[in-house]
Amino acid sequence: MDQRRRWQADLALAGVALVWGATFVVVKEALHDVSPLLFLALRFSLAAIALAIAARPLASKFQTGRTLTSGGVIAGLCLFVGYWLQTLGLRYTTPSKSAFLTGLSIVMVPMFGGLMRRRMPSADEIAGVAIATVGMGLLTLEGGWGGMNPGDILTIGCAAGFALHILAVGHWAPRVNYQALTLVQIVTTALCAASLVGVEARYLRWSPRVLVALVVTGLLATALAFSVQAWAQQRTTPTHTALIFALEPVFAWLTSFVVTGERLSWRQGAGAALILTGILLVELKLLARSRQSARRDGRP
C-alpha cells in the first residue's frame, strides 16, 4: 500500500476523530431539549440531504446493484445501533465517560474480525481486552457494581455497533464508490431513526443548542466525517482505522474540560488510561513485537 496515501488517510481519520470527539459535549447539551431518536432522525436526515446534493453531479458514475445496496444497508444498520445506544447513554453518563467507553470499539474491531475469520484472538488481543476491561471498571464503577449507571451499559453496547460498522465499511469501501456507500448508509440510519421515533416520549424545543448540535453533527460529524472515513478506508485497514480513532476519547475529554470544566477523578483517570493502554496494546501488537525482538537477540 502506497505510504503517501496511507499518511493522507491517517491524517484524514485523525481529523474525523477530532470532530467526533468535540461533539460529545454538543450532543449532551442538546438532549435537554430534544429526545434521542428524534435528534438522530433530524441529524441523519440533514446529513442525507447534504450528501445527496453534493453527490448529484457524480450520480451517473455511481455503481448500483446488490453490492452497494447490501453494503450500505448493513453499514447503516450498524451505525444506527451504535448512535442510538450512544445517544441514549449520553442522557445518563458524562461526555468524557461516554467517549472512553465508546473507545472500546477499537478493541472490539480485531476481536470481531478474528471471530468472523474463525481465528483465535492473539495474546495481544486477549491482554488488551483484559486491561481495557479493568479500565472500564475503574472508569464506571465508582460505587461497586451499583455504580455503573444505565448510560455506561448502553454506551458499551454502542461500542459493539461502531466496531461492526468499521468492519463493514472496511469490507465494502474498496468495492464500491465511497460517496455512494456513504449516502446509502446515512439514508439507512435516518430511516431507522425516523421509523422508531414513535417508541419514545418525543419532545423538541428549537433552542440554539439544538440548532447548533444539528448543524455541527449533521454536516460536519456525519455528512463530511463519514465521507472522509469511507474514502480513507479505501487506503488503510479496519484495524489501522480503529487505532487512529483511539484519539477520539482524548479529544472528547479535552473538549468537555474546556467547555464544561468536567474533571476525571484519579480513579476515573486511571481507568481511562488503562482503556487507552489496552487499545494501543491490541493495535500496536506490542507483545508480538517483544517476542520477535527476543528471538532476534537469541533470548528464549
Image: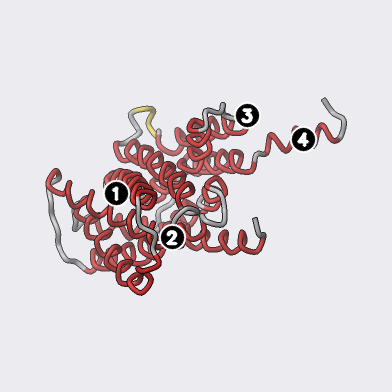
Mark 4 or mark 2: which comes first in sequence? 2
> Are discs 3 and 2 less than 8 Å apart at CB?
no
**Cα–Cα gap, marks 3 and 4:** 13 Å
> What's under tag 2, amino acid-wise?
Asn
Q: Nearer the viewer, residue 276 or 59?
A: 59
**Cα–Cα gap, marks 4 and 1:** 43 Å
Location of mark 1 (residue):
87
Eyeballing the image, is 200 above or below 38?
A: above
Q: Which of marks 4 and 1 is in front?
A: 4
Q: Under tag 2, what secondary structure?
A: loop
Mark 3 or mark 2: which comes first in sequence? 3
Q: Nearer the viewer, mark 4 or mark 2?
A: 2
Q: Which of marks 1 and 2 is in front?
A: 2
Mark 4 or mark 1: which comes first in sequence? 1
Eyeballing the image, is 58 above or below 247?
A: below
Q: Under tag 1, what secondary structure?
A: helix
Whole-percent x, y for residue 2 in the image: 66, 59
Please tell me which residue is depicted at 34% across the width and 36% down the height of the picture. 153
Asked whether residue 93 appears in the rendered view, the answer is no
Whole-percent x, y for residue 114 in the image: 53, 33
> What's under tag 3, amino acid-wise?
Ala
> What's under tag 4, amino acid-wise?
Gln
Location of mark 3 (residue):
123
Query: Which image quarter holds the C terminus?
Result: top right
Q: Nearer the viewer, mark 1 or mark 3?
A: 3
**Cα–Cα gap, marks 1 and 3:** 33 Å
Please tell me which residue is depicted at 59% across the width and 30% down the height of the picture. 127
On the image, which quarter does residue 82 sit in? top left
Q: Under tag 4, what secondary structure?
A: helix
> What's under tag 1, amino acid-wise?
Thr
Location of mark 2 (residue):
177
Location of mark 4 (residue):
292
